Image: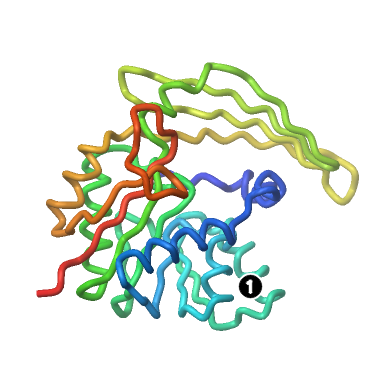
Amino acid sequence: MVPVYEGMAKIYDTLMQDVNYDHWVDYIEEILSKFDTSPKTVVDLACGTGNTTFPFAARGYQVTGVDLSDSMLERARVKAAKQGYSDIQFLQQDMRELNLPTAVDLVTCLYDSINYLPSTAALAQTARQVFSALTPGGLFIFDANSAYKLSSIPDTTAFFEHEDMCLVWENRYDAETRVWEARFTGFLQQDDGLWERFKEVHRETAFTSEEYSDSLTKAGFEILAEYTAFSFSPPATDTSRIYYVARRPIP
């Protein structure tokens, strides 16, 4: 995957400031409780600027953040230092090539980051790497934008403005490739008063539930559940975000 979140890294936390990340981790802990699992070590895959990493650390988990974007990780490290999380390790890795020094009890991949994988082959490769990174009995919990959601996003242009930045956001969905594309043009005001422009293209693949299941089972996982986000209800045809829970079996 070509690294994105370079220019967007500079404004990501501003765009996401209303997201309750503690709520996301609350839900992960509810899932852990449901399956009677008490992990001690966690990898937050596609951790970005650490917004989902820090709530794990605050609750006593030994957590490692992994992301493809060095720009996002740079901000995560600065935030970790400011918040006193000196024991969090941040690694720059492609999720398809996840390689940890020691196995962990839980791997999470949140906020539809899994959709950034470009193909079912990439999805299968990621599943194999995560499987290898887990201890026996360890869980892989991730969420995904459903095929229904991505295919339902209208081809529109939106505009976002906030103090010293503004962003033009163009949406497009290709039914043939099942890829949703977001084209971002951002303008950031610098310290000298001049404006910097950046452009990025983000793409998410609309994988089906069957494709997720096939990749997970072929990697060796036992699939425990599929949930409509933040509930324990099975996904419906119009569910937008789906959580998947898989376990590496104990021999």
Please provide percent x and percent y for residue 170.
Answer: 59, 23
Q: Nearer the viewer, residue 24 or 3?
A: 24
Q: Is residue 35 left or right of residue 231?
A: left
Q: Amino acid at mark 1?
A: Ala
Q: Nearer the viewer, residue 191 or 217?
A: 217
- Number of numbered labels in the structure image: 1
Q: Please say if 110 is above or below 158.
A: below
Please provide percent x and percent y for residue 76.
Answer: 60, 65
Q: Please say if 176 is above or below 203.
A: above
| Scheme of colours in the image | rainbow
Q: Is residue 122 left or right of residue 18?
A: left
The residue depicted at 21 percent of the width and 48 percent of the height is 124
Q: Nearer the viewer, residue 38 or 67?
A: 38
Q: Quadrant of the N terminus?
A: top left
The residue depicted at 78 percent of the width and 39 percent of the height is 165
Quadrant of the rendered image containing residue 207: top left
Q: Which residue is mark 1?
A: 80
Q: Quadrant of the C terminus?
A: bottom left
Q: Is residue 218 left or right of residue 192?
A: left
Quadrant of the rendered image containing residue 116: top left
Element on which disc 1 rests: helix
Please provide percent x and percent y for residue 217.
Answer: 15, 52
- Graded by Cα atoms within 10 Å as few (under 14), some (14 to 19) or many (20 or more), the crowding at tag 1 reads many
The residue depicted at 59 percent of the width and 61 percent of the height is 22
